Amino acid sequence: MNATVDSAAHAAAHAFRDYARATPAQRAQLLREIADGIERLGDALVTCVNRETALPAARITGERARTCMQLRLFADLAERDAWIDARLDPADAQRTPPKPQVRSRLRPLGPVAVFAASNFPLAFSVAGGDTAAALAVGCPVIVKAHPAHPDTAALVAEVIHAAVRKYALPPGVFSLVADSSREASVALVRHPAIMAGAFTGSLQGGMALWRAAQQRDEPIPFFAEMGSTNPVFLFPRALAHDAAGIAAGLHASMTLGVGQFCTQPGLIFLVDDAASRTFLDQLAVQVDASAPGAMLSPLICANYRHAVGALTLVPGVRTLARVDVAGHSADADDRLGGAALFATDADTFCAQRDLCEEVFGPASLAVLCKSPDDFARCAAKLPGQLTASIWSGGEPLGDDSDLLWTLEQKVGRIVFDGFPTGVEVGTAMMHGGPFPATTDSRFTSVGTRAIQRFVRPVAWQTPGNS
Amino acid sequence: MNATVDSAAHAAAHAFRDYARATPAQRAQLLREIADGIERLGDALVTCVNRETALPAARITGERARTCMQLRLFADLAERDAWIDARLDPADAQRTPPKPQVRSRLRPLGPVAVFAASNFPLAFSVAGGDTAAALAVGCPVIVKAHPAHPDTAALVAEVIHAAVRKYALPPGVFSLVADSSREASVALVRHPAIMAGAFTGSLQGGMALWRAAQQRDEPIPFFAEMGSTNPVFLFPRALAHDAAGIAAGLHASMTLGVGQFCTQPGLIFLVDDAASRTFLDQLAVQVDASAPGAMLSPLICANYRHAVGALTLVPGVRTLARVDVAGHSADADDRLGGAALFATDADTFCAQRDLCEEVFGPASLAVLCKSPDDFARCAAKLPGQLTASIWSGGEPLGDDSDLLWTLEQKVGRIVFDGFPTGVEVGTAMMHGGPFPATTDSRFTSVGTRAIQRFVRPVAWQTPGNS
């Protein structure tokens, strides 16, 4: 038993009853106060995040704005009670036997364990979307900090503690577990007081915690979002229409944030013709011209470099562009990731399952197909994904498209004439997808649908003849 | 690999695309035709069910009516597209960068494996609630028949096949697997084409299949509803008001259908006073006067007799009534179950976890508490339940009731001034509950909320500047 985890879990269990009974206005007030508090941290937060993650200030302020927007979006949802799905089947005293009244609504599951992500130190961390969704519906939250940004975690946690104190809520409504050991994570998932878990990170880490959640005496839902290669399908019509624009957009999407997004487009499917070759030449020039970027941690960078190095050795895979990181400033060297572009053909792709694996960083693999009909064959080989993007050149694929049907079974979000990065936070967003993109295709970790991970229906029945 | 299972699963996978694209009207038409077809079977179905299950004709016709009502309820839901939860976040071309339009809705998960229950040969079997819910949203269904009523399963399956043929749907929309081996069940759950499973039955059977579902290369949701002891809390005020009426109602609920319901009230909590002792005396007289009933199978009856026999040996547990089955007709003997009533005190109950275990049949255990405050202490010891019932004597318990809060964490449905049997099928019903009542407290197997087990959101994103 881990004493820190045990103490936080007991405090959460103790706080649950009062917090579940807090009014919609009280939960909304808490979430808004957290957003305000994060904004009040000002430059101190930006400086801290930058020091710990090497993310540039513009990205950090953007992510901060998104984080506060998320908190306020969930505050609105909480305040309007817009998630409770209240239902009522009326009584009928005339029926034999008399029909009772049954009403039901969604209620909070209980204390939720949130595992902070490395790549979003604000929006998927201590006061990120998982925390906001759980707090909105009345679940206490325990966040396990990510070891890559402990000071950022502590700063944001203190904002939440202050908000909890300000509104005189039980302290156990929120706890931060700073212990970053694997043992602490497993202890948290296995603690009997924890009723659900939410994780964003690697397949290995997510599956280990998911297994621990299933092996409890009382299994609990554990939502792991574990990454994706986010295939992009470029139809000849689209390239004929605007090859330069698509190349520029794709380059920006694949290298955004040094490629450290679970929606980074890692696979690009094209038809093997002259236009595609010209397009890839254009894209390769842009990739080669990309400045290397500091990645989130030396470990992430080492993994990225290893994965890119391995791709160069795969028979049938050609290296179209690869940014050399030698010659850059020595003190940043062990974090510098350079973009890369590879190409292969559809048969090689379909025969080698490991070419579907996510490379976390600014690398993409182009797959040259014999015809657009080949796209569906390649799509069928894909494991579950968060997203797929289709550039069809303005001509809709039609409801009977093999590609659209295949992709619907493989992904949570289909992007038309766009790129997968830049996940909008709203009521309709689906940021999830079939295994192994996540452990449960029925749920999203972004947008207001995310609350459905942390609720359950309860029914109350009263007599029909009373 | 089981050839029958493999063939059915491939047919379902093949049918999925066309069936998912069937119109709401087509899915509704199919469900209504199945209901009509079951009704057209007439007495032949009643005779068959009676021969296989020993259930009386009145019960069978009642269950048939419920089954057809369920099919038509889900037909209405399908026809109105009332389950799709469509959402749209509009585009904003003025934003920098332009905000895309995101819309999302629920879509069918894919082929669903349904495991028929022994105790509801119609309503939780081949064309039962699970099948109706899955077909309503566009999922093909494979039903694994229950070995206790194979001819009933075949009759109803033929009705579904005929309906599928009548509307020229792909044959794989529905298959029956008659092979009742454990190996066939596991093969079905593990088949890569199966995307979800639904089961009603024992804890042992449900957990074995649930584990198999988690151990797949691609884990799938598996919904096992595994039974419950359905505690009833009788406050002194209620007994003071109508002890005779409550005793009669409780006796009817505990012995209904020879107690073979997952909502059978197996635990009765009372305050240890003179009124409760009088009440239990009254109830014991009625239990002793109950005619023994033929149970669903010799195995179920043997398990029941064993469990009752074991209860008589538990120190601290008194036998208040026990119907002797000797002297009844010899040919029915190995199926005859006699009602039984036991009593213990709260301390004994709280100290022995096995007293919380379900006895499948017409037996209940009364637990005598020191005061109504003791009810919450006992409730806290309960494992997850489908239901709890409270007779408070007309005085509401209040939102700050320890008992109500504790029960909300333990059960899916709280019944006031009523008994747990007689599950209403409607839009509000929650027939599910925390583990081990089911494998997932977030879902119900009865009522229209049941479709949420078989759907997932998919989002489509289009540019904001187009």
Image (cartoon, coloured by chain):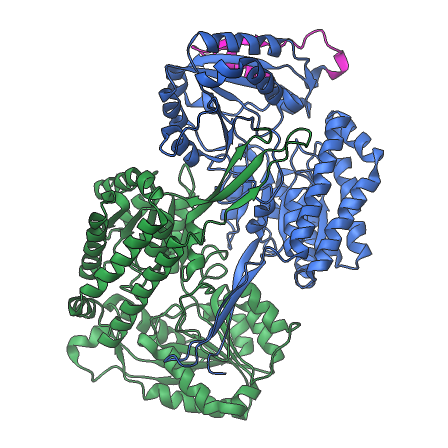
Chain colours: A green, B blue
- Disc tally is 0
Counting from the top left corner in percent of width and height, residue A60 is at 25, 71
In screen coordinates, is B91 left or right of B448? left
Residue A178 visible in the current orientation: no
Quarter where residue B265 is shown: top right
Instruction: Locate the N terminus of chain A by quadrant.
Output: top left
Taking the spot 26% from the left edge, 66% from the top edge, the residue there is A299
Instruction: Locate the C terminus of chain A by quadrant.
Output: top right
Q: Is residue B457 above or below residue B67?
A: below
Residue A463 visible in the current orientation: yes
- Specify the segment rendered in magenta: B305-332
Taking the spot 57% from the left edge, 19% from the top edge, the residue there is B250
Counting from the top left corner in percent of width and height, residue B98 is at 41, 80
In screen coordinates, is B417 left or right of A109? right
Counting from the top left corner in percent of width and height, residue B435 is at 46, 37
Closest to the observer, A196 or A349: A196
Q: Is residue A422 above or below residue A169?
A: below
Residue A381 is one of the magenta-drawn residues: no
Taking the spot 65% from the left edge, 61% from the top edge, the residue there is B20
Q: Is residue A29 above or below residue B413?
A: below
Residue B331 is one of the magenta-drawn residues: yes
In screen coordinates, is B16 left or right of B403? right
Q: Is residue A203 above or below residue B313?
A: below
Closest to the observer, A191 or B349: B349
Closest to the observer, A265 or A176: A176
